[in-house]
Image (cartoon, helix red, strand yellow):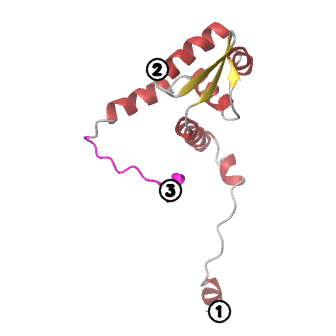
């Protein structure tokens, strides 16, 4: 089964529910969402991230520290510079889905639906058309 087809089978009493709520709290900040979006293309330094998200390096570093605590980002040191990357695809997917949901809230026809490929025709479509 491909990763994007997996469905969460955990129940309401799962030990992970509280931590999942922490993940959502962590991602409830617009700067952190922008950091995740910026890191989708690969690792960036704090200064590069600061430029992309239009915040100071100090503020970006504070956000990254919280994201490291949640194991959302990893750091690689190269001399005195630190480069950050997403630890896995889950934060990227969560943020992507949240942005898609925001498009639904704001746009009558969300952009992600306009660019989606139409579903393939049913193998029995010709039978329906003959009737």
Q: Nearer the viewer, residue 113 or 93?
A: 93
Of the image marks 1 and 2, the number of the one nearer the N terminus: 2
Question: Is residue 9 rendered to the left or right of residue 114?
Answer: left
Extreme-left residue of the structure: 13
Question: Is residue 58 rendered to the left or right of residue 48?
Answer: left
Query: Dot 3: what SS?
Result: helix
| Residue 3 part of the magenta segment | yes
Q: Nearer the viewer, mark 2 or mark 3?
A: 2
Task: Residue 64: give x, y in percent of width and height.
Answer: 57, 18
Crowding around mark 2 (Cα neighbors within 10 Å: few <14, some 14 to 19, many 20+) is: few
Query: Dot 2: what SS?
Result: helix
Question: Is residue 97 rendered to the left or right of residue 46?
Answer: left
In the rendered image, which quarter contains the C terminus?
A: bottom right
Of the image marks 3 and 1, the number of the one nearer the N terminus: 3
Name the residue tied to disc 1. 130
CB under 8 Å between discs 1 and 2? no
Main secondary structure found in the magenta portion: loop
Q: Quadrant of residue 100?
A: top right
Name the residue tied to disc 2. 69
Of the image marks 2 and 3, the number of the one nearer the N terminus: 3
Q: Please tell me the numbered disc located at residue 5.
A: 3
CB under 8 Å between discs 2 and 3? no
Q: Please tell me the numbered disc located at residue 39.
A: none
Q: In the rendered structure, which segment of residues is drawn in magenta?
A: 1-13
Crowding around mark 1 (Cα neighbors within 10 Å: few <14, some 14 to 19, many 20+) is: few
Q: Quadrant of residue 95?
A: top right
> Disc 1 to disc 2, how far (Cα)?
61 Å
Crowding around mark 3 (Cα neighbors within 10 Å: few <14, some 14 to 19, many 20+) is: few
Task: Residue 22: give x, y in percent of width and height.
Answer: 40, 26
Query: Dot 1: what SS?
Result: helix
Residue under the image location 55 percent in, 38 percent down: 98
């Amino acid at each position: 089964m491909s990763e994007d087809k997996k469905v969460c089978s955990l129940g309401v009493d799962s030990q992970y529910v509280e931590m999942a709520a922490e993940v959502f709290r962590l991602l409830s900040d617009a700067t952190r969402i922008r950091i995740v979006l910026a890191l989708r293309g690969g690792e960036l330094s704090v200064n590069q991230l600061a430029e992309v998200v239009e915040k100071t390096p100090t503020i970006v570093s504070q956000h990254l520290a919280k994201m490291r605590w949640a194991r959302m980002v990893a750091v690689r040191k190269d001399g005195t510079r630190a480069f950050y990357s997403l630890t896995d695809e889950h934060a990227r997917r969560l943020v992507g889905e949240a942005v898609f949901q925001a498009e639904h809230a704001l746009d009558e026809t969300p952009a992600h639906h306009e660019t989606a490929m139409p579903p393939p025709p049913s193998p029995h479509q010709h039978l329906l058309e003959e009737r």
